[in-house]
Image: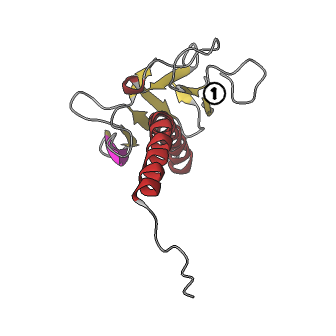
Amino acid sequence: MNNHGQRGATLMEFLIGFVIAGILVALAVPSFRDWIVNTQVRTASDGIKDGLAFARAEAVRRNTPVRWRMPTDGEAGWVVEAFDRGASSWTQVQQRVSAEGTPSVVVTASQSTVTFLGTGTVTPTPTAAITYGISNPNGGDCQTAAGDGSVRCLRVTVSTGGQIRMCDPVLPTGSAAAC
């Protein structure tokens, strides 16, 4: 007697496995795409917040005006510059290019330049908080409180006193991360 167990798999078993794998991939692709779009928005928001915080810290450390600015035409990202009193000019301290993980993100700003004094306050003193809205139009519309939209857009604000925070405009008032 020769009892040999089955070795390998049949063609039908392979086909069923491929069909199941294909269905799972088809279900995961839209969620993965949304995750990538939302990650780009989050990365850009973190970059702007960190750049503003760096500019404020440098102003305090150097006890001289330091500005964070969005670039002029032809540039992308942001630039931090310190005022050189001896030369009466601005010297670049740090720069971030938008191609660093966030090429399709759009930033809408209430003010393109923020200048911090050595005390950490903003000059000239704005009448309202300075806001930077970050979205990714390639992913669709921003989410709303009603649940419309597929992109979790974020906002970075600089208060009149120089405090910097990132917030989510969709969250209800009272939430720590709400705008």
Residue type beneath disc 1: Gly
User: Residue most toward the right?
Assistant: 174
Per the image, the residue denoted by label 1 is 161
* Element type at mark 1: loop
Q: Which residues are magenta?
A: 90-96
Display colour scheme: secondary structure
For the stretch drawn in magenta, what is the main secondary structure? strand
Is 20 in the magenta? no
Q: Is residue 118 above or below residue 140?
A: below
Q: Position of residue 144 (x, y in %)?
A: 59, 15
Q: Nearer the viewer, residue 24 or 61?
A: 24
Number of numbered markers: 1
Please give the name of the residue rendered at 36% of the width and 45% of the height, measured from the top-left corner.
Answer: 96
Q: Is residue 168 above or below residue 78?
A: above
* Magenta-colored stretch includes residue 93: yes
The C terminus: image quadrant: top right
Residue 39 showing in the rendered view: no
Q: Residues within 10 Å of mark 1 (few under 14, many from 20)?
A: some
Observer-nearest of 7 and 143: 7
x%, y% of residue 62? Answer: 50, 49
Quick check: can you spot residue 19? yes
Q: Which quadrant, please, contains the N terminus?
A: bottom right
- Identity of the residue drawn at 43% across and 44% down: 22
